[in-house]
Amino acid sequence: MKLLSALVGIMGLSILAIAVNAQTSQPHPYKVVFDLTSSDPIDQQAVIRWINEVKAVNPRTETEVVMYGRGLDLVVVGKTSRAADVAKAVGELRAHFLVCAIAMKNQQVDKSQLLPDVEIVPDGIGEIVARQSAGWGYIKVGH
């Protein structure tokens, strides 16, 4: 009887240990803003890849790409080769792509030239600063 009680106790502890490990192996979701200022295809590919990888680990992680300077090219029709990737990131992965209105004005880009579901913010740098103040992580896209 003592042996049976001991085995039941060991099994109970084992199950508890497995449950605790399963809960801690899944990373907690977080919020990250990617800063894209380059039209370089390698940088564009990198930010799309990072979104896919982050979301694969934890789909509840929030991602935002803020584009200003030449970063707008990722989401401008006729300049991007990644329209399908952006559409997948927005639709399936719920990533947000935001462009700076100041950069749009400076580069004479009209809203009608943007890919669907791309959002416009008044100031790209201000958006990044606001996200950081709200506790978001910050990643500068570049190589």
Image (cartoon, rainbow, N blue to C red):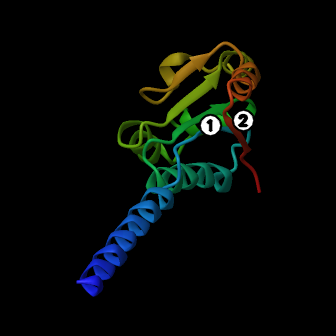
Q: Which mark is residue 135?
A: none
Residue that numbered label 1 is attached to:
73
Say which amino acid is labelled 2.
Arg
Q: Which mark is residue 70?
A: 2
Determine the residue positioned at 41% across, 46% down.
84
The picture places residue 69, in percent across and down from the top left corner, at: 75, 31
Determine the residue positioned at 34% across, 73% down.
9
Dividing the picture into quarters, in which one does residue 127 lie? top right
Dividing the picture into quarters, in which one does residue 10 lie? bottom left
Determine whether the residue tagged by mark 1 lies in a helix, strand or loop. helix
Determine whether the residue tagged by mark 2 lies in a helix, strand or loop. helix
The picture places residue 28, in percent across and down from the top left corner, at: 53, 47
As displayed, is residue 89 above or below residue 117? Answer: below
Determine the residue positioned at 74% across, 24% down.
133
The picture places residue 16, in percent across and down from the top left corner, at: 39, 64
As displayed, is residue 109 above or below residue 45? Answer: above
Check if mark 2's residue and mark 1's residue have beta carbons within 8 Å. Answer: yes
As displayed, is residue 5 above or below residue 111? Answer: below
Residues 109 and 36: in front is 36
On the picture, is 14 further left or further right than 55?
left
